[in-house]
Image: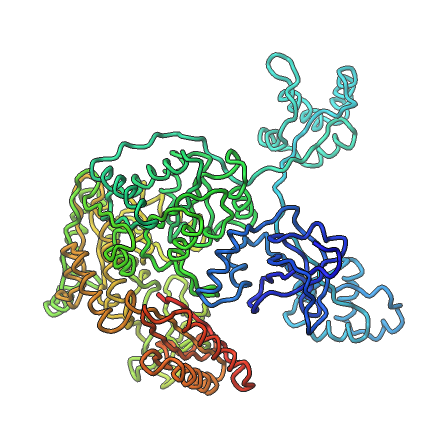
Amino acid sequence: MQAENVYADVILPLSVEGLYTYEIPEEYIDSVAIGKRVIVQFGKQKIYSALVRKLHSIKPDHYKPKEILEVLDSEPMVTEMQFRLWDWVCDYYMCNLGDVMNAALPPALKLQSETLLIRNEDKDDEGIEDLNEKEYKILSSLSVDSGLTINSIAAILGQKSVMHLIKNLIEKGWVILHEEIKDKYKPRLKSYISLHQDVDESKLKLVLDELERRAPKQFELMMLFLKHFYSASGKANGNISKDILKSEKEFSDAAFRTLIQKSILAEESVEVSRLNDADKNEIKLKTLNPAQQQSYDEIRASWKVSGVSLLFGVTSSGKTEVYTHLIQDVIDRGEQVLYLLPEIALTNQLIDRLNKVFGGRVGVYHSGLNSAVRYEVWQKSGNPDPAESYDLILGARSSLFLPFRKLGLIIVDEEHDSSFKQHDPSPRYHARDSAIMLAHMLGAKTLLGSATPSLESWHNAKEGKYGFIKLSERYGGVKMPLIEVVNIREETRKKLLSGLFSSYLKEKITETLKNGEQIILFQNRRGFSNMLECRSCGWVPQCKHCDVSLTYHKQSNNLKCHYCGSVYNVFQTCSACGSTDLKVKGFGTEKVEEEISAAFPAIKVSRMDHDTTRSKKSLSKILEDFAENRVNILVGTQMVTKGLDFDNVNIVGILNADNMINFPDFRSHERAFQLMAQVSGRAGRRAKQGRVIIQTGDPNHHVIRKVVEHDYESFYEQELNERMTFRYPPFYRLIRISLKHKKEHTASLGANKFVSYLRHYLGNERVLGPEIPMVPRVKNYYIRNVLIKAEKEHSFAKVKEIIGIVQQMFKSDPELRPVQIHIDVDPV
């Protein structure tokens, strides 16, 4: 690399197009490398940590590049293989590299500056008496602190709006703005106490005599320290953890500090990991039963033909046991395994189980972990020393971007789950499809597993693109649950319906409780009721920021928007006609919980939905209580369908199947089938056959009949025929484009022009819309949707190129430039 005119193209952690070129100062010529983070200034003031992507000696034509301010890393943080995946995600999902960088890196690796207000030391005190009281208070605070954030100043003044005050102080020259880079990762330090090097045996006796007379607390601390310091044989035992000393008896930090200041004790801080390493191999792998062994053999054989295989295993068939044997094979070869899960928070049982088999070589990575832990998992995953890196990583979709040492297998469990698709913000990638691409890049294998595979994966397997393995019997010979259907319309006509529950469901719940068994009640909507409605005129309260009705939550006694999160007080009168006759309409999990508790007051009911599981502890408590039979009935949304394995559940009640089936989306039948089949699989997983009761107004609907019959294959074939007829995946590829603006007219104008441009290039049949979505305004933005259907044989790359051309046309039109364009490739 030449010493002159050397430049680096970097990725910024922003949703901006392309790479940005910076000049490398001479002092950093030897230290800048691809994959390292560097500090750069972007714009007039902001400072970011960027990633070096390219090095070259070509000076930009149209501008003078700024210099790199600092190099942060001694070794590259992102490998060339990771960059290959980033480039593919960027290209396939039509996003910016900065979007991918934000999704891929743990928060601790993404530094950006924080705006600080500092006092201008060059200005004397002349004119200070002209400042008003609040301006003077800001200046006084800055005399004490070297710099304050805008939020800190707002807190000092006790008011939200402070920018006008800051602006005045800047204009008068009293203060200046400064951007300071903040490191988000702080290593965990553990303190160890030892005798000071100057304290020998004779001096120690004098010290103890002095402390016993003058400082009894310090003497007590010294005696405890010496107890640990000397082993049973009387030999010194080295440094003692400060935490151990404090755990035996509460000593203040002042007591330690005084002894250290007197040069009696010494303190050393040592960096320790935040990761809890378990003991290795607490239990051995179970022997596979004949059906599992056959699946295991077929998977290994299929990988010789195709790098991707689909394991179609019914609920409770023991797919996880097959996974563990395949994982062990890969680990024995010195390679790593990535085990992808849709809802990492719901898989404590699985994590505990795999930890017992594979011990401290298991890492867990997901957004629920704090920033420092995620950083340490990132570091350990890519450690080139096999003894210091993970063999197995369990993670949510973002774990795809870890810097693996040597990846040999990716398992995508519950591959059908829509949680694998990121919706907002960009990149809107699908972890299952990205995992297949990553494994292909690395020469690794991919195993997709599900009791209800997605139609796309089913079709690929049946067409021979993937290997196909079927595990069709439950572990231990347990029968599939008996699924029964109750006609709610008939129950209502005969006046047998008791609130939300049919007479038959209540009867079976009563029997189950008498037998000491448990029940799961599934309602795929949270809250108490769907909405409030005026009986007089039909008025329904709506969110001020979104065109959607508010959901009533009885426990918190408020109305919530489930789109933007706004919370409102409950209306006592109708805003349209003034009537006080308001009623609740529809029902969610909160109302189910209330009604079942009223019907069975002696039993314990728990609810598991987004509202009750906001913290990790609350979710763990709910699952632990249910697993230990401290809860009799668990009410929940689709969270209860995912990965839960309880021995004592005999009854599953599906309270409203129709809402899922009749949702206006081409995937609604597939999703309804998957949800009902998955939640049904929670019943009777051990000794006896479970029972599932589906409440519906349309018992003869083909989706419900196929669930009752456990007839996966004919359901899939029927759905595939409809998808072919109406030109949907897996036979056609979709791209959904959402155009958003705060003015409805501008959103509509932009959408109409966008569609006209697209049709010019792609024709009328491939471009649908623009359409007004079910919720036409979210967070004050009006939305218009456009859908592109591209034949499989039609060049998908060409379609994306045309979309890019239309985007550029928008940017050149001053009227359309403010319209936001969100592109979703392969929407789910």
Screen quadrant of the N terminus? bottom right
Residue found farthest to the left: 494
Relative vertical location of residue 115 with respect to residue 196 in this rendering, above or below: below
Q: Residue at x 40, y 30 (%)?
A: 281
Q: Position of residue 265 (x, y in %)?
A: 73, 27
User: In this rendering, does residue 621 appear at all?
Assistant: no
Tell whether 417 sits left or right of 126.
left
Q: Which residue is most to the front? A: 2
Left or right of residue 702: residue 191? right
Q: Closest to the observer: 102 or 172?
A: 102
Location of the C terminus by quadrant is: bottom left
- Give the mark count: 0
**Pick the front one: 689 or 295:** 295
Please state the horizontal and vertical placement of residue 710, each as a whole percent of the image. 16, 54
The residue that appears at 74% across and 30% down in the rendered structure is 259
User: Image height check: is 351 above or below 33?
Assistant: above
Residue 768 visible within the image: yes
Instruction: Work out which residue is located at the far top of the displayed protein and give it.
Output: 233
* x and y, in percent, of residue 321 in the image: 30, 39
- Structure colour scheme: rainbow
Residue 673 lies in what quarter of the image? bottom left
Give the answer, above or below, for where 322 lies relative to 115: above
